[in-house]
Amino acid sequence: MPWPLADSVNDVAEHLFGEPISYARRLARDTWITQAADRADGTTLTGIFDAAYQSIDMRGDGTSAASVGPKVDIRKAALSFAPVRDDKVSIAGVRYSVNRVHDDGRNAWQLFLTRIG
């Protein structure tokens, strides 16, 4: 289902808050697929990064669990592949590993990250 209003809001948010991202996926021991921040077609891979995203998970028994950590939102159309755990992301010179991937339901991926360098 298309989300034209969500796409319009994402356009504005990405323009205001988007940061260049380099993205890499390991295919085999020494083989990687990469999408650099400045791509060959002249476009830039961008995402909305939050260094201290707060997540609260409500459980069925009334308890909750909270966590704080880095997260980046990337439009699905920006990547030529679906992100998976252990992919690598570089934002502002800091390297991260993808810890969890969530589909936001509105044409974007939420990538929960772990800092690795």
Image (tube, rainbow, N blue to C red):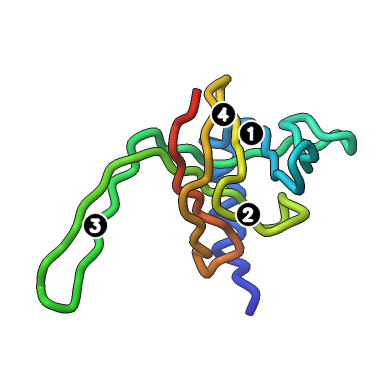
Spatial separation of the CA atoms under disc 2 and disc 4:
16 Å
- State which tag comes first along the sequence, 2 or 3: 3
1 and 4 marks in contact (CB < 8 Å)? yes
Spatial separation of the CA atoms under disc 1 and disc 4: 5 Å
Q: Amino acid at mark 1?
A: Ile
**Residue pictured at 16% horizontal, 63% vertical:** 64
Secondary structure state at the residue bearing disc 3: strand
Whether label 4 touches label 3, CB < 8 Å: no
Q: Secondary structure at mark 2?
A: loop
Q: Quadrant of residue 29?
A: top right
Badge 4 element: strand
The circle on residue 91 is 4
Q: Which mark is residue 21?
A: 1
Spatial CA span between label 2 and label 3: 23 Å
Residue 46: x and y in percent read: 64, 38
Name the foreground residue: 17 vs 112.
112
Nearer to us of marks 2 and 3 is 2
For disc 3, the marked residue is: 56
Q: From the viewer's perspective, tell me whether residue 58 is left or right of residue 8.
A: left
* Disc 3: CA contacts within 10 A as few (<14), some (14-19) or many (>=20): few
Viewer-proximal residue among 12 and 37: 37
Residue at the farthest top position: 93
Q: Disc 4 and disc 3: Cα gap in Å?
A: 24 Å
